[in-house]
Amino acid sequence: MSQGHLGFLGLAKETTWGTAVAATDYVELMSENLSTSIDRFPTRNIYGGFYEPDDYAGMRRSAGSLVHAAHPVSLGHLLKAVFNNSSASVVASGLLWTMNYTGVKSEFADGVPRQPYTLEVNRNVTSSHRLAGALCNKLTLSVAPNQDMRVTADWIAQAQTMLAATTPTFPASSADPFTFDTCSVSIAGAGNARMEAFTLSVDNALEGIAALNNANTIARIRASGPQLIRVSGTLDFVDITEQQDFINQTERAMTVSVTRAQSFQLVVDLPRFVYSAFPVGMPGRGRLTVAFEGMARYLVSSLAAIGVRLTTTKSNY
């Protein structure tokens, strides 16, 4: 009998899209649903019978999501996957680095919009599932009380095969993920203690493209639009300051910081944040909150709409 708690995820960067490589890093998950679906198509509509005719199997499409706690080591791979860039600065030689990521500036290669990865998913059923040519379509970071910083990564892959399970080695430093109790949010340079929940999403708008290339797997992955950076959350509604910012469409800088012992840190900078929705109302007799939405806009002077700094023990993302 297979059991989820005995499974694991391994991943590694590819140098050529779709050419599988062995896992170099491993991630402890909360859940996953990476799978392959098969398109189907009929070839007969008028066939002189009451029965349903046979159809044909078409394109194989591999996609799904990974959900896990934001760990100072594994998170670096997800940021590399969604932004397709990273640079390192030394904090403590040979021990600690600060990795810098910005909004996507270029594609990995023709027909490969972002850094491709090979994913190994072991579900405690003898062999592992291996997804090659996997690109991160959307990355979501969420923080709420009594929870780790929760990561949801949506992937699109070129193909799925099977391989003998490898042996996972999970990061030991830090042994713990980022959690809510060291998270702080500032707007326009001032701490905002009324933020009760926060979600950041980076959407690459990717889609798998089929072609007549003598194969039943996708031929390439394309971006159907620009990278979209969105913010949402819950605010304690005690004054009209933030609502007026929404009405006036006032832009503010927003910074989110979360730390972990031994100097591990994640800092997200949005230099031009603006509210896109700020619905107010009184649903009843209870305390009032606002489920806001917002977006990050491109800042010409920094050549990006977002900047992310991750201080961790790994530099070769």
Image (cartoon, rainbow, N blue to C red):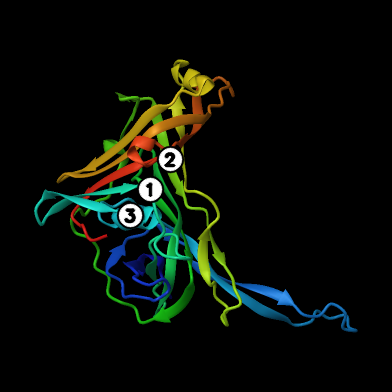
Q: Is residue 9 above or below residue 191?
A: below
Give the amino acid at mark 2.
Answer: Thr
CA gap, disc 1 to disc 2? 9 Å
Q: What x and y, as percent, mark residue 219?
A: 53, 72
Residue neighbourhood size for the residue with mark 3, other residues' Cα within 10 Å, grouped as few (<14), some (14–19), many (≥20) = many
Q: Are marks 1 and 2 in contact (CB under 8 Å)?
A: no
Q: Nearer the viewer, mark 1 or mark 2?
A: 2
| First reached walking from the N terminus: tag 1 or tag 3 | 3
Q: Which residue is mark 2?
A: 199
**SS for callout 3:** loop
Q: Which mark is residue 85?
A: 3
Q: What x and y, as percent, mark residue 91?
A: 13, 47
**SS for callout 2:** strand
Q: Nearer the viewer, mark 1 or mark 3?
A: 3
Q: Which residue is mark 1?
A: 150
Q: What x and y, as percent, mark residue 186?
A: 33, 28
Residue in the image at 27% along x and 66% along y? 25
**SS for callout 1:** strand
**The image quarter in which residue 47 lies:** bottom right
Q: Is residue 234 above or below residue 36?
A: above
| First reached walking from the N terminus: tag 2 or tag 3 | 3
Front-most of 181 and 159? 159
Residue neighbourhood size for the residue with mark 2, other residues' Cα within 10 Å, grouped as few (<14), some (14–19), many (≥20) = some
Residue in the image at 16% along x and 44% along y? 263
Q: Can see residue 286?
A: no
Give the amino acid at mark 1.
Answer: Arg
